[in-house]
Image (cartoon, rainbow, N blue to C red):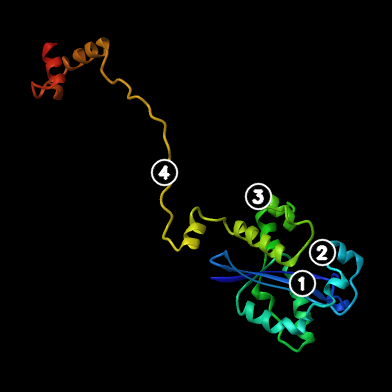
Amino acid sequence: MREIVLDTETTGLDPLTGHRLVEIGCVELDGHLPTGNNFHRYLNPERDMPDEAFRVHGLSEPFLSDKPVFAEVVADFLEFIADAPLIIHNAEFDMRFINAELTRLGFAVLPMSRATDTVAMAKKKFPGAQVNLDALCRRFGVDLSKRTQHGALLDAELLAEVYLQLIGGRQPGLELAIKTGAGPAAAAVVARPFREPRPHAPTAEETAAHQAFIGKLKNPVWLKGSTSKMGALGKSG
C-alpha cells in the first residue's frame, strides 16, 4: 500500500493573510515502510520572511530568493503524491497551505479525506500526553539528533518512523526481508548455557517406600515383566 508522509514549512500561520509555502517534503511509504523515494523542494514565497518564522525553520529571504515558485513545482508535486493517502502531523495546517497554493493556480484542491492526521492518532493513543513531533519521537526512541530546526523533509522522515509506531510498530525481521527480497526472516537462534544432567536414580528411602506401596496393590503394573528393574524390586519385596 503506497502512502505519502508530508510536511511543509511556511512564512506564517494563515494562508488567508498572505502567508506562503517555503518548503515541501514528502516520504514515500510502501507497506508502511520508507522506500527511499522522496520529494523535496524549497520554494520562493514571493514575499518577506517574518522573524518568528525564520527562527522556526531557518529559511531566509536570500536563501529562498533563487528557488522555484510553487507554480514551477506543482506538476511534479501532484505527480509524486498521485492518489496516495497523505500522512500529516496536524493535517489541517498543511492542507490549508497546499490547497491555498493550488487554488491560486486554478488546480483542484486536495480533499481532507485523503489526509490521516497523526496528531489525532496520538491523542487517541496517549490521552493527555504531549503529541508534538519531538515528544512522540522521544516516546518511541526515534533519533532527534539532526533536528536542530524544523525542516520539511527531515520532519517527514521522523514522522514516518512515528507513524509506524502509532499503527503498531515494526514487525521483527520485516525490514530485512523487504530490503533483501528474502522471505520471512529465519527463526532466531538462542544461545543456552550447557548444564550437566541431573541424577535421577532413586534413593534407598525412595526405593523402600516404592516397594512398600506396590506390596499393597493387587497385580501392580510394576510387577509385569520380571526382567524389568522395577519388577525385580517389587518381587524382592
Residue 41 % position (x, y): 73, 74
User: Tag 2 or tag 1, which sits nearer the N-term?
Assistant: 1
User: Tag 4 or tag 1, which sits nearer the N-term?
Assistant: 1
On the image, numbered disc 3 is attached to which residue?
Answer: 141
User: Tag 3 or tag 4, which sits nearer the N-term?
Assistant: 3
Residue under the image location 42 percent in, 57 percent down: 184
Looking at the rendering, which quadrant does residue 89 occupy? bottom right
On the image, numbered disc 1 is attached to which residue?
Answer: 23
3 or 2: mark nearer the eye = 2
Cβ–Cβ under 8 Å for marks 3 and 2? no
Residue 235 % position (x, y): 11, 14
Task: Measure the C-alpha gap from mark 1 to mark 4.
Answer: 47 Å
Question: Residue 54: in sight, yes or no?
Answer: yes
On the image, numbered disc 2 is attached to which residue?
Answer: 57
Q: Identify the secondary structure beneath mark 2.
A: helix
Residue under the image location 84 percent in, 62 percent down: 56
Q: Which mark is residue 105?
A: none
Q: Amino acid at mark 1?
A: Glu
On the image, numbered disc 4 is attached to which residue?
Answer: 189
Category of crowding for the residue at label 2, using alpha-carbon neighbours closer than 10 angstroms: few (below 14), some (14–19), many (at least 20):
some
Cβ–Cβ under 8 Å for marks 1 and 2? yes
- The quarter of the picture where the C terminus appears is top left
User: Tag 3 or tag 1, which sits nearer the N-term?
Assistant: 1
Task: Measure the C-alpha gap from mark 1 to mark 3.
Answer: 26 Å
Q: Identify the secondary structure beneath mark 1.
A: strand
